[in-house]
Amino acid sequence: MRQRAALVLAFLAVVLVLAGAVWRYGYVKGLDQLDARGQADLALAGDRLVGQLQRYRDLAVLMADHPQIKAQLAGTDARATARLLQEVADKTAALDVAVLDKSGRVRVAAQNEFPRDMSDQAHVQRALRGALGWGHGPGLPLTKRAFYHAAPVFDAAGQVQGAVVVITDLNGIDYNWRGTNPAAFFTDDQGIVYISNRSELLFWQRPEGMAGLVPPVGAPPEFSETYPGGHEVWHLGWGRYLPGDALHLTRELPVIGMRGEVLLDVSQVRAFALSQALAFAALCLAFGSLLFLAAERRRALAGANVQLEGRVAERTLALRETNAKLLREAAEREEAQKALRRAQDDLVQAGKLSALGQMSAGISHELNQPLMAIRSFAENAVQFMERGAPERATENLTRISDMARRMGRIIQNLRAFARQENGPQENVDLGAVLQSALDLTEGHIEDAGVRLDYVPPDRPLMVRGGEVRLGQVFVNLITNAVDAMAASEVKTLTVTVSDADPLTVNFRDTGPGIEMPDKVFDPFYTTKSVGSTGGMGLGLSISYGIVQSFGGQISGSNMSEGGALFSVTLERSLEGAKAA
């Protein structure tokens, strides 16, 4: 027993050492991957900061060549220059724009809040020597953090005439970064945090010759560092918005004289490495347990060899029972898998039935208007036959045939949807489809006493879409506009076609407008009362989906002078675009 216990303890010690090695290896490899991702994130953040600041450098260079600036340094009226600088500062979001003479004194500025003498500032001295200057520092009294760009102004002889200084408020630069991940900050040559997406780190400073940061006031918070696998990992106690253990990466930004730094949370890397180590330890323990059990079994068999014949039968019976149990379990599992497949098939079928149920409501809405038109044309045909006007009756019967064909196309679209197929895109004449919709709703417009204001396009306008579905969209918009003007004193429907890019059809009425424009395209949303014109609230929702399938857009808004405006934007077909 003592020998067995020593062997088990030795095995556990070996497993522990190997698991620790696996954890260390996984942790370092995870840090390598995190380092690569962090370097990319840090490079992206640095490039974004440099790009934002260089816009103001380019502004300083551009303003240095402005004739008004050169004229100001030559002694002209400063008021016009001040207005120019104020306008430039307002449009570019610069904190201030100032013009300096050769001695470094401010001749004119947009804000006039900064010291009049800037000759002692390094970036100004560099600009007065004929080179671009930049730097950062406080911009009191307007801001505690400012970045300066100075560009020299040359006269006709190439001599430095003065300088233009553009002052940028760094609060506006990093405002949109606040709270983003990972935690990033930028330090100057003195180790002071000047820009960061964590406002609590601003003006923290790196101790000389040491890692980490300390706040400008108060006791330094908890901090330590380790270097696993050559990576610098900080252990922080800096608040809940910063990771407790973070990989620290740096990147020099000589263009702006700063260093970019980022803190990447290593908790997930550590947890993944721990899970790998635990899995390895569990595997080793399982394998060791099997070996131990095998050894014990062999020892037991050797000690009971004389009883082997008597126990063979018992062991065989046990094995048979175990085998039968395994077979039963296998059969039960096979049945469970079959039941799972049947349940999945049932779920798919239920999804199809649900989709068809939703489509049935929409298609009944779309077929209702053609059926009503067929009924109206049929009744009119009977009256024309009774009046001895067979040509008019023939015309109505032809229209009934057209409506029937259109209904067939609608039903074909329903079958295509049920098979999850999209209807083919066609090149249709927008003017012809719009005229067909107006013809279909002509009786409804006249019965409602609405005056139609429409000028058809003077040439064919070919667009991408389907004739039936696009016509349904126009019919829905026209009938909705007519119904909306039921209680209006002035009833005018204005339909216009804009041949510009993009191609747009506008429907404007003189009704009360849209009560809730943001919900007008939601399914089952309607403002119509129950009655002859009451609807299910599906027309505009269906129209929205149709126009979206064509690659277009549909929108609704209220006009300032009253009424509603619905705009349908469509894509031109290839041949229509070439013709345009």
Image (spheres, grey):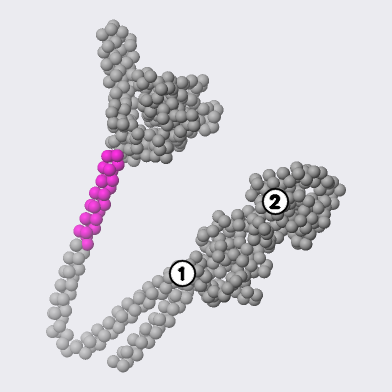
Looking at numbered disc 1 in the image, what kind of residue is underneath it? Ser
Instruction: Determine which residue is flagged by label 2.
Output: 111
Viewer-side label of 1, 2: 2
* Placement of 408 over or under 350, stated as above or below: above
Where does the magenta region start and end?
333-358
Q: Which residue is at a point 16% across and 79% down the rendered structure image?
A: 315
* Placement of 417 over or under 531, stated as above or below: below
Point out the residue furthest to the right here.
157
Query: Quadrant where the C terminus lies?
Result: top right
Q: Residues within 10 Å of mark 2 (few under 14, many from 20)?
A: some
Viewer-proximal residue, 511 or 25? Answer: 511
Q: Which residue is at a point 48% across and 67% down the rendered structure image?
A: 240
Residue 195, given in percent of the width and then of the height, sits at 61, 61
In the rendered view, does 232 fall on the left or right side of 407? right
Residue 16, given in percent of the width and then of the height, sits at 40, 81
**What secondary structure predominates along the stretch shown in magenta?**
helix
Of the numbered discs in the image, which one, if any, rests on residue 267?
Answer: 1
Viewer-proximal residue, 234 or 317? Answer: 234
Measured in 3D between alpha carbons, the distance from the residue under mark 1 to the one under mark 2, in whole angstroms, is 48 Å
Q: Earlier in the sequence, mark 1 or mark 2?
A: 2
